[in-house]
Amino acid sequence: MIGERVLGGLEGPGLLDHNVTRDLGALSERGTSALRHYGLAGEALGSELSVHLQAFRAAPKLILVGAIDYSAAVATLAAQSGYEVVIVDARESFARSDRFSRFATVQVGWPGEAIDERELGRRDAVIVFSHDPKFDEPAILAALRSEAGYIGALGSRRTATDRNARLAAAGVDEAALARLHSPCGLDIGAATPEEVAISIMAEVIATRSGRAGQRLVVGEGTIRPR
């Protein structure tokens, strides 16, 4: 399968080709590979047939600003979800902990400069965690200059309001501010860094897939991304 074109088939049931094409399309969007199992007639919930689906595409990038507990938790989950993760912090003593380098590339330097030097597209994301305006706000401004599909910032609603006011005063217009997810994450009652990571990554994936992030039981239409 190349883009929307299908070249050949598996010489099996039509349902098998249909389900394999659908699953490969989802994997191609994410640039990941997987072993999928199907029924003898090609059913998606079967187990008799195994097909290895391999997608060739660069992994989406996730840049995390600030080496803190939340960064470590998000980096772990994001790496497992197929992201190429970079944690940026100007404070070398914060950034050099082994807990960050296990799942991410760690870059010591000014976050805004680190974002500006990368080419980011709609599959990529930037999230700021440092809780220090001199790091966070230049990073957000750099992210808004990019084509990143998701830009998020951790913090309370009051922090977000105050930050948005400073960004507006710096010349950021309403359309650009609308790209900023702040506070970032879905409302799932998260408390620990690990739960917050799930909340944030759920919103990142929902945004990339063009979904609202609502409960499946109240939604309509197909569950899997097209």
Image (cartoon, grey):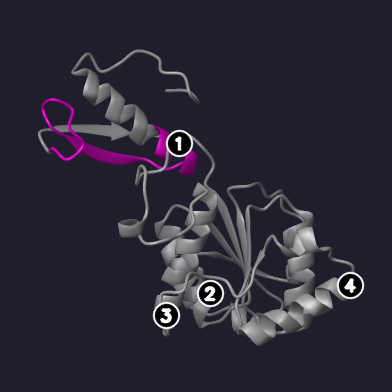
Hey, which quadrant is residue 156 in on the image?
bottom right
Badge 2 density bin: few <14, some 14–19, many ≥20, Cα 10 Å: many
Q: Which residue is mark 1?
A: 28
Q: With respect to residue 220, does 212 lie above or below?
A: below
Q: Earlier in the sequence, mark 1 or mark 3?
A: 1
Q: Is residue 171 left or right of residue 149?
A: right
Query: Residue at the location (76% across, 75% down)?
Result: 164
Residue 73 in view, yes or no: yes
Q: Quick one: SS at disc 3?
A: loop
Label 4 sits on what residue type?
A: Ala
The residues bearing labels 4 and 3 have C-alpha atoms spaced at a distance of 32 Å
The residues bearing labels 1 and 4 have C-alpha atoms spaced at a distance of 39 Å
The residues bearing labels 2 and 4 have C-alpha atoms spaced at a distance of 27 Å
Hey, which quadrant is residue 18 in on the image?
top left
Badge 3 density bin: few <14, some 14–19, many ≥20, Cα 10 Å: some
Q: Which residue is mark 4?
A: 170
Q: Nearer the viewer, residue 213 or 58?
A: 213
Q: With respect to residue 188, does 201 lie above or below?
A: above
Query: Residue at the location (41% across, 18% down)?
Result: 6
